[in-house]
Image (tube, rainbow, N blue to C red):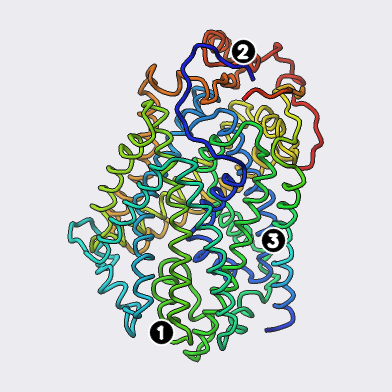
Amino acid sequence: MSTEAIIMMVAAIVIVWGGLAYSVAFLLRNPEGSVVLLDDHGRPIEPFST
Amino acid sequence: MAAASSTQRANRGAFSGRTAFILAAIGSAVGLGNIWRFPYIAYSNGGGAFILPYVVALLTAGIPLLFLDYAIGHRYRASAPLSFRRLHRLTEPIGWWQVMICVIIGIYYAVILAWAAQYFIFSFTKAWGDDPGAFFIGEFTQSIEAAQATVGLDFVPAVLIPLIIVWVATVGVLALGVQRGIARTSLIFMPLLVVMFVALVAIGLTLPGAAQGLDALFTPDWSALTNSSVWVAAYGQIFFSLSVAFGIMLTYSSYLKKDADLTGSGLVVGFANSSFEILAGIGVFAALGFMAQAAGVPVDEVAGSGIGLAFIAFPTIINQAPLGTVIGVLFFGSLVFAAFTSMISIIEVIISAVQDKLGLGRITSVLVVGIPMALASLLLFPTTTGLNLLDVMDAFVNNFGIVAAALVAAVTLTAGFAALPTLRNHLNRSSSFKVGRVWQLLVGGIAPVILGYILIGQFQEVLLNGYGGMPQGFVNAFGWGMAGGLVVIALIMTLIPWSARSNAAKVDSDGDLIPSPILDRLVDAGRIEAAKQDPVVDDATLPLEPPRPAARHAAHTTTEEF
């Protein structure tokens, strides 16, 4: 493989798989039910009725 | 959100949590296109340089449109037609159009799944022999030539039997319900798919010539970035690959809990889908590199996509490669897993719509949808004319069905009903990753321009050159006629009233009222009064103030990251 091709393969992997790793980490930092809910006008609604 | 006291509750399924939803959504997005379309699209549109337009397309169209689907389905808690009806009565046809697109895709997608399942078994004995091309066309599908394309009833048992099994499995899984059927299948199949494909890539990388294949795929042609068709190809790949704008993600998000993190989950789904595409690109081109070296030809002579790649090129590779049987089992097993989780998501769109429209129970709805679709699929495709029919229907339902429906939805929601600020607020109400006006600009501005460009390009291509060398009457009937027929049927379905038995007359399955339609005080004055009278609508979500240019659709201020 040429150096150019290797660099582009690594770049593709880092960008896309890095994006996946970041988005998973971002999701895990906000567990289910941890986000303050807002109504249609941006006001907090607590407790949420389900 | 207020709870209703006396109104009947909708009988709908639900995911147990966001992990189940994310796996099901990834299962839907990761399908045949990831494995057999992306590698060739990347290779033929700049190679390594393609990653730039591809990532731009993911961030500026794929993920924003995914968020749009999530917002509509999650806010209005229903199938595509009922969600769009609840958004505004005039948008209901868009929902039915999406359902009809899924009907067409479902009946032919099952056939490809049946082929993959059959080839999985063939892999053990290499039953395709020394000439996989002649075997696939002449023996396995017994297809007539494209120039003589027509519809006939000369059934091919080798396809008919696996197709029956595919439909039985699909109906069986869907009958188990959203959590026990769809979510559990994804929970098992998705990790298996990843493990199998990683193993396939690992074996592929050890093949002689693999480096040659990867060199062909990743060597960048930077001049391609100045070519608009390369950018259109990137947007097209992202758009078709993510399963957006034809009801799947909308339906799945309607099964999510109300406090679900929509955008956070959407980012994972979007990047997971693309991550699998990169993996597929490496695996496919490592194998094609081996094939090229074995034949003593450059990679461009063996590179291909679609049915030819899967059912002709790969069997050829399997015949020649060390560990060929293992490669065959892993490749066709991956195709089966990827296609099956996508198949159930496609059929679920229709089941959900029928359940909402007729107010039926789960199993009855599955049978009402599954049996006629299975019969149509079994009648039309496992025949000597099935391959050409599949080819033309696939091309037209994608290019003139999904793209056109997405374009109409984006324009209608933006210009027609100014729905994006409300949907943006809905995304932000429970999500960790806040979206702002940039999201509105991408969905309402960039996406329609790109979709319009793709649609016009496809129109020009087919009008000028015809399609695939097939007779014009055949293309007119099963291409243009089918695509136009979907719109007509969608309009007819909209005219059929929703009965008191339907889920339109019921509150959410948890007893909560449904958010009001997105109404304008001037244009929809009468509808606001009707919404106030509707026992299932939450009054608190009705428009508050008379319209003022700056505040008419004012959105609340949040941390805007996108």
Please give left or right for residue B326 compared with residue A37 in the image: left
Residue occupied by mark 1: B319
- Residue at the extreme left of the image, as rendered: B154
Residue B249, horizontal then vertical, whole percent: 54, 42
Residue B274, horizontal then vertical, whole percent: 62, 59
| Residue B459 in view in this figure | no
Q: Amino acid at mark 3?
A: Val
| Residue B53 in view in this figure | yes
Label 3 SS: helix
Q: Chain of mark 1?
A: B
Residue occupied by mark 3: A16
Same chain for the residues under marks 1 and 2 in the image: yes
**Among the 4 quarters of the image, the one containing residue B554:** top right
Q: Earlier in the sequence, mark 1 or mark 2?
A: 1
Label 1 SS: helix
Label 2 SS: helix
Point 75% across, 38% down: residue:
B434
